[in-house]
Amino acid sequence: MVGLRRWARARVRVLTVVLAVLGVQLSWLVAPAYACGCGAMVPQAQRQISVSRETSVLRWDGRQEQIEMRLTVQGDTDRAAWIMPVPHRASVDLGDPALFDQLDAATAPVHRTRHHFWPQAGDWPLDGADDDNAEAPPAAGAAPPRVGVVDRQRLGPFDVARLTATDPGALDNWLRTNGFTFPPRLSDALQPYVDRHWEYVAVRLAPETAGASLSGALDPIHLTFATDEPVYPMRLSRLARTPQSLGLYVLAAHRMEPRSSIGGAPPRVLFAGRLSAPEGPLARLASGTPYLTAVAQEFPQPSLIFADHVLRRTASDTPYQQVIYQDRLLEVAGMPAWLLTIGGSLALVVAVAALIAVRHARRPVVPPPPVHPPAPIG
């Protein structure tokens, strides 16, 4: 009976895992993943594309902002459009992939060893234990809204257009004219940017090899525009059907932080500190803005995103760096310290007991005093 019950529990576990895997795969196939943390990723009709990772660098010197962004995508489409709102007219260039490697190295956690006295799971003798543990709207009678193409340029695999629009429908017409389907919900999401007179950077992505699908890490895109306050556009990510994550490096004169969580989990600081003698692309970007802050944030329910990230200076420039501890059992000459301590204590107890016993054995036996018979009564 015990064996049958174990076999039945094992079947339930296997079935649960299989259903979970199928559920994840099905959700990926059904959910249209056209949103990313900085703008909107619009795939070719009847195709899929998802942003598996987004890493961005934001540099702000008090007057001008630069954003360098690298996206890692997955999908079956050979074309896609990427739309990003910007508060003022932007210039667009290709970025340098080496910048992100330098940032990863500069913000890497410190690894330290931490010793513990008593054994934990994985230490002897517990090594076998289980671990459960833009512009204003047109007046009446004006010409129909349209997209104004400020500039169009080819940057490697990217066809970049800088656009103005007086209405989200104008962007719809532009995308349809260029062979892309405009998601209906995106039109409503763009309305706040139209109301605030923002402009747009539209990027057509195409793999360098004809017929290949967009997959893997794309070349970085570098945007530059004027702004009075550092802002990272996030509002369009509310269109995503799957959880989103953001990794953001901020270069400024001081330590920076998001003003609010904008509908996601609280942002986490991964690194904060002044860069010392940076080189290469990081040195060029950090010139005049030497303080680096690395922030990570998760958005379990993207539909709750209600604004863009606006950054502000923190109260102090306190540095911070992650520390990853590797726990090790405290040892002395290759032996667990706890075992030596317990063994030594037991040996001491035994030695003291033996010493007491020896002393007790060597103590001379004092004979009892002689007993005299009572004197006769006369």
Image (tube, rainbow, N blue to C red):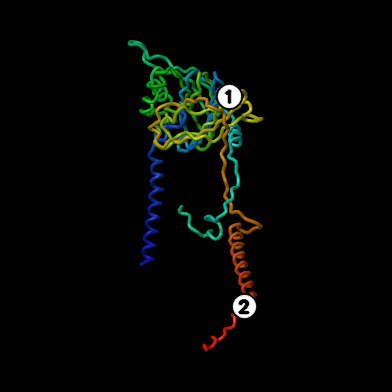
- The residue positioned 60% from the left and 43% from the top of the image is 111
Image coords of residue 342 (percent x, y): 58, 61
In the foreground, 309 or 255: 255
Relative to residue 143, is residue 76 depicted above or below? Answer: below
Most distant residue in the left direction: 140
Amino acid carrying label 2: it is Val
Specify whether residue 211 is in view.
no
Percent position of residue 60, x then y: 55, 23
Could you tell me the amino acid type at mark 1?
Answer: Ala
Give how far apart the Cα atoms at labels 2 and 1 are. 92 Å
Q: 10 Å neighbourhood of mark 2: few (<14), some, or many (≥20)?
A: few
Residue at 46%, 52% in the rendered image: 133
Which residue corresponds to the image point at 37% horizontal and 66% vertical from the top-left? 2
Q: Is residue 71 above or below residue 195?
A: below
Locate residue 43: give its quadrant: top left
**Residue 366 has which mark?**
2
- In the picture, the quarter occupied by the N terminus is bottom left
Local SS, label 2? loop
- N-terminal label among 2 and 1: 1
Instruction: Name the secondary structure under disc 1.
Output: loop
User: Which residue carries the number 1 mark?
Assistant: 253
